[in-house]
């Protein structure tokens, strides 16, 4: 009895290869589109000359940094 599929392909090899390619695919998709694992970005506020990212100025007052930052710390990710 012959099967419709090609038995020259080893089943184990086939699934191993498939799994590997699926994993690579998912990794690529996750990196590009996942809002759950945003790529690391250093906080621009760490460069803030007034507070160095601490939110507290040298004179003890609160710093509202004069810049917006797209990093994961400042941008809420849902
Ligand atoms: Zn930031
Ligand atoms: Zn600041």
Image (cartoon, rainbow, N blue to C red):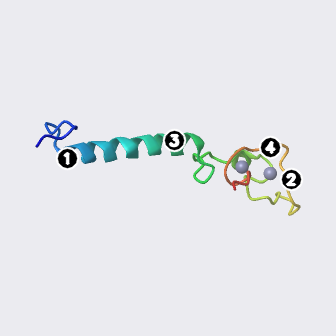
Between circles 4 and 2, the one closer to the viewer is 4
The C terminus - image quarter: bottom right
Residue 30 vs 53, above or below: the answer is above
Q: Closer to the camera, 20 or 52?
A: 20
The answer to whether the residues at label 1 and label 4 have Cβ atoms under 8 Å apart is: no
- Between the residue at mark 3 and the residue at mark 1, the CA separation in whole angstroms equals 27 Å
Circle 4 sits on which residue? Answer: 68
- Please give the name of the residue rendered at 82% of the width and 42% of the height, measured from the top-left corner: 67
Circle 1 sits on which residue? Answer: 11
Circle 3 sits on which residue? Answer: 29
**Badge 4 density bin: few <14, some 14–19, many ≥20, Cα 10 Å:** few
The answer to whether the residues at label 4 and label 2 have Cβ atoms under 8 Å apart is: no
Mark 4 secondary-structure assignment: loop
The answer to whether the residues at label 3 and label 4 have Cβ atoms under 8 Å apart is: no
Q: Is mark 2 within 8 Å of ligand 2?
A: yes
Between circles 3 and 1, the one closer to the viewer is 1
Number of the label disc, if any, that sits on residue 64: 2
- Between the residue at mark 3 and the residue at mark 4, the CA separation in whole angstroms equals 27 Å
Between circles 3 and 2, the one closer to the viewer is 3
**Badge 2 density bin: few <14, some 14–19, many ≥20, Cα 10 Å:** some
């Amino acid at each position: 009895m012959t099967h419709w599929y090609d038995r020259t392909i080893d089943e184990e090899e086939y699934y191993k290869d498939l799994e590997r390619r699926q994993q690579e695919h998912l990794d690529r998709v996750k990196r590009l589109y996942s809002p759950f694992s945003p790529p690391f970005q250093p906080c621009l506020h760490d460069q803030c000359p007034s507070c160095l990212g601490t939110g507290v100025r040298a004179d003890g007052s609160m710093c509202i940094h004069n810049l917006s930052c797209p990093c994961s710390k400042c941008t809420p990710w849902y």
